[in-house]
Amino acid sequence: MWERACSRMRYDIQHRCRLPGRLREQARSHRGRFLQIKIISFEEDDAMQTQLL
């Protein structure tokens, strides 16, 4: 009985956490942009540090 309740709860949580396809794609593209911005900022920081030396 407990096992069935746990599996049902797990199933429910998984389905609540899933995003619709359109939103999932949008979230993925935003995450990619964030990573690109972070990489660019690290490259700029490195360039600034080498200029200061």
Image (cartoon, rainbow, N blue to C red):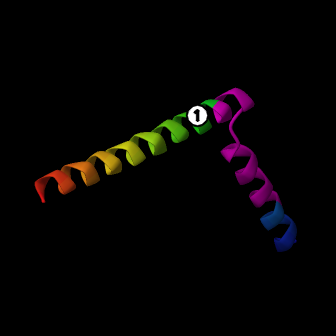
Residue drawn at x 53%, y 41% is: 31
In the displayed structure, 7 sits above or below 22; it is below
- Mark 1 is surrounded, within 10 Å at the Cα level, by few (under 14), some (14 to 19) or many (20 or more) other residues, namely few
In the picture of the structure, the residue carrying the numbered disc 1 is 29
* Image location of residue 36, percent across then percent down: 46, 41
Q: Tell me which segment is drawn in magenta.
A: 8-25
Q: Which image quarter holds the C terminus?
A: bottom left
Based on the displayed image, in which of its 4 quarters is residue 29 positioned? top right
Decide which of 51, 37 is in the foreground and name it. Answer: 51
Based on the displayed image, in which of its 4 quarters is residue 20 positioned? top right
* Image location of residue 45, percent across then percent down: 25, 50
Decide which of 47, 12 is in the foreground and name it. Answer: 47
In the displayed structure, 13 sits above or below 32; it is below
Mark 1 lies on a secondary structure that is helix
* Residue 26 located left or right of residue 15: left
Task: Indicate whether residue 19 is drawn in magenta.
Answer: yes
* Image location of residue 32, percent across then percent down: 54, 40
Residue drawn at x 70%, y 53% is: 13
Residue drawn at x 73%, y 52% is: 14
